[in-house]
Image (cartoon, rainbow, N blue to C red):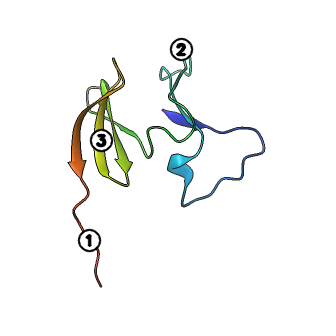
Amino acid sequence: MYRRLAKGTTINHDQYGFQGQMVIASADGTKSEVIGADGDYPWACWSPDGTQIACLTKKGIQLIGLANKEVIRQLPAKASISS
């Protein structure tokens, strides 16, 4: 899994997870497939079985099934950070 950015895009460390399109591919780099549009599936990571991804959004964490690209579960953002 990686994000594909348009040529000439300046990478913003704080926004990287929202930049470009998410691509999934086989471990050897073959069979790459673009998933969604620019900014879709932010800060994604794999599920242990590779059938889902978890995305960190401003609304919380979304668990998305890769077979149908639908939200399976959403964990709302409830935490607050205080010093």
Which residue carries the number 2 mark?
A: 31
Spot occupied by residue 10 in the image (x, y as percentages of width and height): 71, 53
Q: CA distance from mark 1 to mark 3?
A: 18 Å
Q: Dot 2 lies on which element?
A: loop
Mark 2 is surrounded, within 10 Å at the Cα level, by few (under 14), some (14 to 19) or many (20 or more) other residues, namely few
Mark 1 is surrounded, within 10 Å at the Cα level, by few (under 14), some (14 to 19) or many (20 or more) other residues, namely few
On screen, residue 71 versus residue 19, left or right, reads left
Q: Which quadrant holds residue 12?
A: bottom right
* Dot 2 or dot 1, earlier in sequence: 2
Q: What amino acid is labelled 1 in the image? A: Ser
Mark 3 is surrounded, within 10 Å at the Cα level, by few (under 14), some (14 to 19) or many (20 or more) other residues, namely many
Q: Are marks 2 and 3 in contact (CB under 8 Å)?
A: no
Spot occupied by residue 73 in the image (x, y as percentages of width and height): 21, 37
* Dot 2 or dot 3, earlier in sequence: 2
Q: In this orientation, which residue lies closer to the viewer: 73 or 83?
A: 73
Q: Dot 3 lies on which element?
A: strand
| Residue under the image location 21 percent in, 48 percent down | 75
In front: label 2 or label 1: 1
Q: What amino acid is labelled 2 in the image? A: Lys
Which residue carries the number 3 mark?
A: 62
Which residue carries the number 1 mark?
A: 80
Q: Dot 1 lies on which element?
A: loop
| Residue under the image location 29 percent in, 47 percent down | 61
Q: CA distance from mark 2 to mark 1?
A: 40 Å
Spot occupied by residue 68 in the image (x, y as percentages of width and height): 34, 19
